[in-house]
Every structure is written in C-alpha cells, then in structure tokens.
Amino acid sequence: MRMCSIASGSSGNCIYAGSESTHLLIDTGISGKRTEKGLVELDLSMRDIDGIFITHEHADHIQGLGVLSRKYQIPIYCTEGTKRGILADGRIGDLDEALFRVVLPDRKYSVKDMVITPIRISHDAAEPVGYKISHGKQKGAVVTDLGVYNDYIVENLKEMDILFLEANHDVNMLEVGPYPYPLKRRIMGERGHLSNEASGKLLCRILHDNLKAIVLSHLSKENNLPELAYETVRAEVTMSELPYGGGDFPLYVAKRSEVSEVICI
C-alpha cells in the first residue's frame, strides 16, 4: 500500500491511497486540473481512480469534485449528511446522484482489494468523518478537521502503519493574527481544528513500535509554519513520559500545493 498527499491545507486537500490494483482519493479540494497533474506525478490518471471518499462538504475538500465526477463518472463515497451538503453547494455544479455511495461510520467498505472504514470526527460540518484504509495487514488513516479528540478517536488510530494527522495552527499565531474573533473561536473550538500541541498530544497516545510514518496535514497558511508544526509535535513526544523521542519515527509535513513524499509500506 502507498499513500501520498497531493495537496494539503486550508486552501485545498487531496490524498491518494492505493495498492497495485486499487486507487482511491480522499477528498478533492483542489481543481480538477491540479488533481490530474498530481496523479500524473504518481504515474496514474483519473481513469485509474476506483473511488473518491469525501470527509465533509467544506469547499477545501470538494472543490474539484463536480468537474471530476462529471468527466470520469467515479463513485463518490460519503455520509448522508455530507451528501446533502455537497448537493446543496451550488459552486461545484450538477452532480449525478447515482454516483453517490452513502457510508456509515464504523462500517467497513470494500473497493477491490482495499477496505475503508469511516470514523466519526468533531467538526462544524453536517456529518464529517475521517477514514481508516487497509490493504491486507497494512493500515493507514486520514484524520483532519477535528476540533477535539477522545477515546474513540484514540482507539481507532491505534496500530496504524501510516497516519495523516491534522496540525492546523499554532495557538499563539492564531491568537495574535488577523482573523476576526468569531473565526478564531471557531477554529479553536470543539468543532474546529487541532492545534500543533493537540496533534502532538494525540500522537503520544497512539505511538507504537511499528508506526512507519506520520504526515502532519491541513496546516493553516496564515496561522502556522511547516517548521513550527514539525518541531512542536516532536517536542510533545520528547517531553512526554513515553519511551520514545521526537526523532524515533519518520515525521513529515504535507506540502500545501505540491505532491508530498510517497509513503510505501
């Protein structure tokens, strides 16, 4: 199995996950052209994609969905609430409802030789989810856009080989930055986004000896820096009581508008 961020951040998100015979996208929050270009860098095309899994209906996760679904007729997997939100969004144009496959949290869905399990997350969307992805014994997860985590999230993220984990903002940068106060409250709220510190604390609860890669994702352009996210998360691990240091695991930061490192297991 391999996973790779095609784009990541508050301006657009798209992650590839696949095996030799199955190819999936998690979110299409960038233009169709940028999505296609990213896949070319992975030696793929949209015609190789077997399914698009949408986490929630916000624009930075569905921007390219209308163009791509109309052109390639690829099945769209999402919750019922997310489906309603997508269909109500006039910005992406008409969509063929027959392409939708409604999923339920905590149920497993097979696409050829891969299994995808939606998990509930706390975010200000209709019915948002993250996704666990497996191919045989190989396991990965994509969990971004969550204001808080709980024991349910922790249990679902244990034993992963690859983890795409939100590290959206630095609290100090957000507090002194230009955003209006209500938006700051939203971002820092229970249905907002994980800070760098919170991301590191969550990571401390799910680290294990066989974790192959952590990819910090969905960084804010205005309220974070890649180096700051990286060092803050590393510091949280190093300062914890765990028998691990911040340098004991491969830690990456997903690039905002470029294809990031391909993680293969």
Image: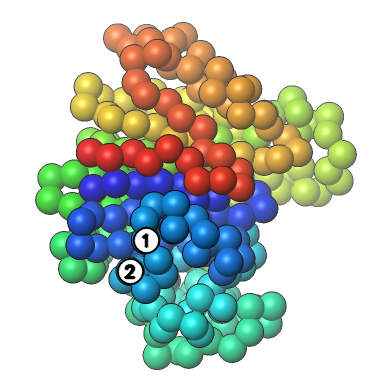
Q: Residue at x 49, y 83 (%)?
A: 71
User: Is residue 179 or residue 218 the one in the foreground?
Assistant: 218
Vertical comparison of 239 with 143: above or below: above
Q: Are marks 2 and 1 in contact (CB under 8 Å)?
A: yes
User: Is residue 234 or residue 253 the one in the foreground?
Assistant: 253
The residue pinned by badge 1 equals 44
The residue pinned by badge 2 equals 48
Vertical comparison of 244 with 9: above or below: above
Vertical comparison of 125 with 252: above or below: below
Question: Is the residue marked by circle 2 packed among few (<14), some (14-19), or many (20+) residues within 10 Å?
Answer: some
Residue 74 in sight in this render: yes
- Where does residue 162 sit, x and y in percent of width and height? 31, 38
Q: How many marks?
A: 2
At label 1, the amino acid type is: Leu
Quadrant of res 247? top left
Vertical comparison of 237 with 170: above or below: above
Residue 70 lies left or right of residue 16; in this view the side is right
Q: Residue at x 83, y 34 (%)?
A: 177
At label 2, the amino acid type is: Asp
Q: Residue at x 74, y 44 (%)?
A: 185
User: Is residue 43 or residue 115 the one in the foreground?
Assistant: 43
